[in-house]
Amino acid sequence: MDLLHSQLAALQQKLSFVATDPIDWKFYVQAFSWGVTLFESYLLLRQYPLYSKTSPPEVLADHFDAEAFTKSQNYGKDKAKFSLITGLLKQALDSAMLHYGLYAFAWDIGGRTTAYFGYGSEYEILQSLAFAIVLFVISSIPSIPLSAYQTFVLEEKHGFNKTTPTLFVTDLLKSWAIGFVIGMPFLAAFLYVFGWAGDRFVPWLMAFLLAFQIIMVIIYPTVIQPLFNKLSPLKEGELRTRTESLATKLKFPLKHLYEIDGSKRSSHSNAYFFGLPWSKHIVIFDTLIKESKPDEVEAVLAHELGHWYHMHPTKLLCVSQVHIFTILAMFPAFLHAPQFLRAFDFSQAVSVRPPTIVAFLLFQMILSPLEAVIGIALNFLSRQFEWEADRFACEIQERLSAPEMKDMGERLSRALITLHVKNLSTLWVDWLYSAYHHSHPTLTERLKALQAFQSKRDGAAKKEL
């Protein structure tokens, strides 16, 4: 542990310029946040002309009729327009908040609120919670009409919306309540660990965050998700038999098999698993069950279990821990730099002892361009995992010595096509847009890869004969 802290201290020494050099941090954040937003807008403008194509990619020509393809193109075009406008609007609002010192204002309002109840500035955690609530209210107000437009205009126009105005408001209030009930204690504990551990907070805070992630894995499906969707045991029948048989053969620790009423809000469909290493749960959208045959849903689940088999969630968790460690290791240099807060219009009195939550929030803004690059790298890693899971589904026959699964790759291809048709997913995708935004390969890429996996496997089988 001493070695770790000595290395962290050396890093802080290299970052000492944060506290000494006269850097206009507000200008830096404004410039790079706008740079990221304009780059994302550029990517949308690269993608937009592809929505004017009149026919699908050759590999998909036999699977998409003219009507389905036209609907897909129109949906993609409308989503791109919405994303472009909302992206620029949100950046303009964020930029205005920075320019007019709204973060310093929110901290002052938080202090006045706690002072009203008899708590002075020495109660930093209480003031931090009030500060967080003020910022949440300020940022939520403009997001509500945008969310309503997306739900009741964009999604409604293309036949996906099943949300009623009452359900929309109810979901909004529930999400706020959950954010308060879970978010406030989390933030208080987060700040307490900072204060308790002092400059040696990094390993302790990482342990706290990891424990919180594990707790959320436990309580999300049992407490949070039932507030929004109904999880019902999958009915007896071919799909349940196939799924339980597949899980048994792979020694997947399946505890519960659920059907979720995704159609309550949207026509989009999916399937996923979650849980602790020794207790897993599979959830299948009712829309997927309705739109696909049992053997095709089984293929989708074979892909999902491929993620489990290759430990992709665990690997991503490890990557995220490295990411979090890097962020926390750099943070003390900004926490102990009064002029850093002064650059964002905080008073001298506040900047002398920078509040942890304020310094951390502004530090996150400093990292925005780096986070954009990291996002591209994580998308690349995620796509590699998707290829691997697809290959797992194709090769499951050999792994389980189950000849009845020899066509699993073909079934997965059919299921993916059905999902894309029903979800009106984009078929023509610009490579740079995809690299930045997509954690999954495009449908065209996946179908070509599945065909290659299948051909390679068939060729190997012929050689053995």
Image (cartoon, rainbow, N blue to C red):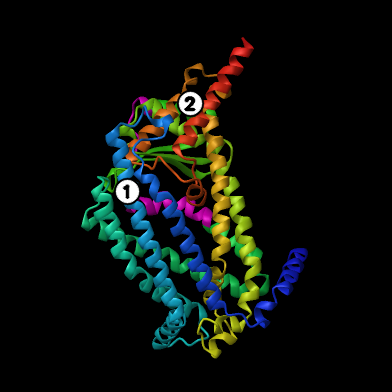
Q: Secondary structure at mark 2?
A: helix
Measure the C-alpha gap from mark 2 to mark 1: 31 Å
**Along the line of sight, the residue nearer the viewer: 232 or 30:** 30
Q: Nearer the viewer, mark 2 or mark 1?
A: 2
What is the magenta segment's predominant secondary structure? helix
Q: How far across and down, in percent of the image, does residue 283 sit?
A: 40, 40
Picture layout, residue 255 above or below residue 368: above
Q: Secondary structure at mark 1?
A: loop
Task: Please provide the residue range marked out in magenta.
Answer: 213-239
Picture layout, residue 94 above or below residue 428: below
Q: Which residue is mark 1?
A: 229
Q: In the visual, does 22 lie left or right of 128?
A: right
Specify the amino acid type for callout 1.
Answer: Asn
Q: Which residue is mark 2?
A: 409
In magenta stretch: residue 402: no
Q: How far across and down, in percent of the image, does residue 153 sit?
A: 24, 54
